[in-house]
Amino acid sequence: MTTLLVKNAEMIVTMDDALRELRGAAIFCRDGFIEQIGPVEALPQDADEVLDLAGHIVFPGMVNTHHHFYQTLTRAVPGTQDANLFNWLKTLYPIWARMTPEDVFISTQTALAELALTGCTTSSDHLYLFPNGARLDDEIEGARIVGLRLHAARGSMSLGESEGGLPPDSVTDSEENILKDSLRVIQRYHNPEPGSKLQIVLAPCSPFSVTGELMRQSAQLAREYHVHLHTHLAETEDEDDFCLQKFGQKPVAYMQSVDWIGNDVWFAHSVWVNDAEVDLYAQHGCGVAHCPSSNMRLASGIAPVMKMLARGVKLGLGVDGSASNDGSHMLNEARQAMLLARLHSGIKGASRSAPDAPPLMTARQALRVATRGGASVLGRTDIGSLEVGKCADFFAIDLNKVDYAGALEDPVAAVVFCAPVKANWTVVGGEVIVGDGQLRTLDLPTHVERHNKASRRLIAE
């Protein structure tokens, strides 16, 4: 039995149903779960570990709903800097085909270190190619050491260029092997219990890299074992054209035809969706991982996230792969989401003073999408808010920084409106992963040196 007491915080932002923002409050945790939250004087005064967070603001841990950890090895590659999605992929596929199991392990730790240092406590990852003996197990072991919660998506590509797909045949696998390994990792690793630090997701990569039959069989397998499904969808206009030419349907209709609509499914991006498709998502409980930085970086477009929120679509944030975002900064992603949604509202042309002016995303909405929204997308009811019975997952930021000078009338909004900073504390299941701004689970300077060596080898070969 271990206990943790958090006290003296400037504010605790609960993200509970009442959206309470508590001053003069504390959090008492036992064995990784929140046991009490409320006025300091009403809680125990001692614990095995006590965090005095005077001057800090405390938030629920953020939830990253879409990433490709391995791409930390190929950031800002010159040939990809100014490419759209399809050309970007065609440039990078041959480089990624050289990855080793050690590369997957190293890149996982790099991505998770970045996420932890920016307030993320749970991350999904979409690993969809397994060259040179690499396995999802390599990612899982790397994540175990860093200490964040992981939803490991067993991705796949089976439709190579020779069969009309986008990826080269060298990075695809047979559907028999894909389904066999998908079953293996579910049976070995998936833990659906409250507080789970590891869950498995089945995630064929995209409509342009797998067959419809693999999509159907993956959905059947996932539902037999009660795991979630994830894929890229409606990211670009090129994808729209591809699906119409190859399947005679737009991407969302194609998903319906292969049994990929339901509350156990979430899609990355969904930039190019119309009103009827947004309504379909809401009706069937489909989730969306919104990746604003990546969508801007690749000039893919602007997802209609305010429309999604208004119609009740489950919406979370994703930093996306570090070759299309070039970073894994969750607080920055929340800020980008707010700003891009505002830009989208402005593009619609209504005067801000007009009665029918589209609503602007608020800072608190952006934070809710980054926390409770992400938890909902992943199907988790034990994370995303600071409430009794939920996981002791949170991050804290010191408000006494030059970044917030003159902005403390509303510190909650300041954290989003002001330039993004790193977290001072990140706690997962009551365990301090980041303390005083330092990652505690890795020797980061040594790791960065190891990562850069792997990256140089991969790109130079």
Image: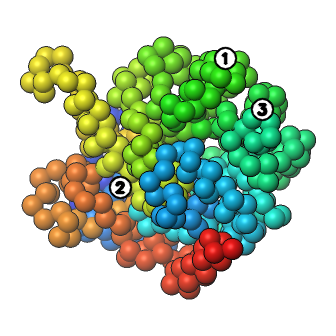
Q: CA distance from mark 1 to mark 2?
A: 38 Å
N-terminal label among 1 and 3? 3
Mark 3 crowd level (few <14, some 14–19, many ≥20, 10 Å Cα): some
Is residue 178 found left or right of 344 in the rendered image?
right
> Is 360 or 450 nearer to us in this picture?
450
Residue, disc 3: 211
- At a point 62% along the width and 21% down the height, the residue shown is 244
> Is 443 or 96 nearer to us in this picture?
96
Secondary structure category for the residue under label 2: helix
N-terminal label among 1 and 2? 1
Tally the numbered discs: 3
Q: Quadrant of residue 246?
A: top right
Residue, disc 1: 248
Residue 64 visible in the picture:
no
Mark 2 crowd level (few <14, some 14–19, many ≥20, 10 Å Cα): many
Q: Quadrant of residue 131?
A: bottom right
Is residue 273 found left or right of 364 in the rendered image?
right
Q: Position of residue 424 (x, y in %)?
A: 36, 70
Q: Position of residue 393 (x, y in %)?
A: 48, 56
- At a point 69% along the width and 74% down the height, the residue shown is 461
Amino acid under label 2? Asn
Residue, disc 2: 332
As drawn, 335 above or below 352: below
Residue 413 visible in the picture:
yes
Is residue 98 found left or right of 67 in the rendered image?
right
Picture quarter with the N terminus? bottom right
Q: Nearer the viewer, mark 1 or mark 3?
A: 1
As drawn, 219 above or below 458: above
